[in-house]
Image: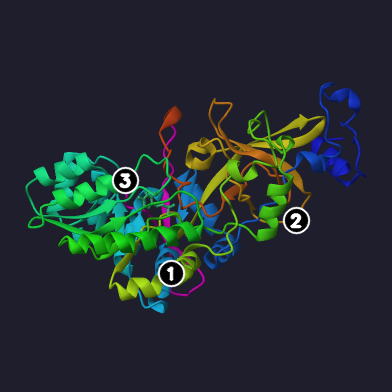
Amino acid sequence: MDALATMTATANAPAGPGPHGTLANRPATAANPPASIADITAAPMTAHRAEWENRLFADREMLAHIADTVGGPFHVLYPARIAANIGAFRQVFDSHGVDGTIYYGKKANKAACAVRACADSGAGVDVASIGEFTAALTGGIRGDDIVVTGPAKSEDLLLLAASRGALIAVDALDELARVIELDIAARILLRVLPERSGSRFGLNPADLATALDRIPRDRIRLEGFSFHLSGYDYAPRADLASQLIGNCAEAQRSGHPATTISLGGGFGVDYVSAQDWARFAANVTPDWFHGNSLRRYEFPREANEAFYPYHFADPGAAMLDRILGHRGLAERVRAAELRVAIEPGRALLAGAGNTVFTVQGVKTLTHHGYPYLVLTANGTSLSLSEQWFDSEYLPDPVLWPERAGTRTPTCVGGATCLESDMLSRRRIPLPRAAEYGDLLIYPNTAGYQMDSNESRFHDLPIPPKVVLHDAPDGVGFTWALDSAAL
Ligand SMILES: *Cc1c(COP(=O)(O)O)cnc(C)c1O
């Protein structure tokens, strides 16, 4: 009996040790050994599919053609979706009658086409380095549509920002002093340290008061205040935004213009259904994972610490709607005649990209006697960043071409010599057994997954970004390589 046939037999057998699952195969120390192959297989996390992805996956040739042409793994981006996401945020601002500005948090993806989509859709860009700043200018963003965040910015970056009329989010008093020393006109925000926060970013109330006194009003325009919170709840953002309305009023009393409050980023992305996420989080166990990975978490109790919350009832623009609707925030912003800025990174890229690997190896391993497949992809987990944050990217990859078969627990490793180079440590219930040459498409990777950790480790090439635009027939696509330097 070959491994896959065994797997099928085991999967179909009643709960209890299968052909390989005899007690003798199990470590004597295991308190609760898995009772069936289902117990070593992760719950499914089926990613929402964008309309353009349905068209792409249904095309019998396009993906395989790109894979052949590129000759390695590649990322796919569909900028029309970024434009749609920007439009959705704008619509929420409009529906609340709030003057809103959207800055794309550029660190979420280096693709030039993302900046270009912002320029074409009237969004600005949030940057934190000279490289990001110049990439924004190159992509068609005007200097005054750029906001510069990040701690203790270099003098070169401050000079570039000030001279181009960008908004500088000042993070500390010493940084403010360096902005003043530039001795040229500058537009600034003051980043606020949230109350009871242990963050290393932002100014506390005493520093804020000092800053108001020190800012020379003839050269430095204090345009307002900003924050960026970790976590994904709307209420803390609305509450802190209310506080910033007060900061603006106080600054105006000291003669500063102060008409902008920036709520930062952290708008959630909805990757999977509520049901998939709830079932996964409630049942996750180390027995779902290859090797000893994630054993430091006490599952399922710590599922919410170990993983990004992959389901959101109110993601992206809907979360902005909740924030503006919370305790009359929109009314108060309008009454104070303020402008609200946001800096979404991940949420502007929601549903706008995926990452495609080719299967270049298939082997069978066992856990407690139950067989599962380990695939080797033709790239590395450096192209799936979540794997490097002691966590796991949970939306299930799509095995392409899609066809019926036997449900097969499958892990995915990278083509390197590192034991820890795993694109998926958990045993994913793929709908069939993968074969050499199949494609494995990781969904919804545009926000943070693609390129924050990529390097030329092992002299492997960095995966190119393939940009899709709708073909004139409205069904197919044209494609080109993204123009950002690799
Ligand atoms: C990272 C970052 C963002 C973007 O965060 P997302 O979670 O991607 O929306 C926005 N503003 C600042 C200051 C950041 O550091």
Tell which circle, 1 or 2, labels the residue nearer the N-terminal end: 1
Dot 1: within a 10 Å radius of its alpha carbon, few (fewer than 14), some, or many (20 or more) residues?
A: many
Q: Magenta part of the protein: which range?
A: 460-486
Tell which circle, 1 or 3, labels the residue nearer the N-terminal end: 3
One can see residue 432 in this view: yes
Dot 2: within a 10 Å radius of its alpha carbon, few (fewer than 14), some, or many (20 or more) residues?
A: few
Figure quadrant of residue 222: bottom left
Nearer to the camera, 137 or 103: 103
Residue type for callout 1: Leu
Q: Which residue is mark 1?
A: 324
Residue type for callout 2: Ala
Percent position of residue 335, x then y: 32, 75
Alpha carbons under labels 1 and 2: distance apart: 46 Å
For discs 3 and 2, the disc positioned in front in the rendered view: 3
Alpha carbons under labels 1 and 3: distance apart: 25 Å
Residue type for callout 3: Asn
**Residue 404 image label:** 2
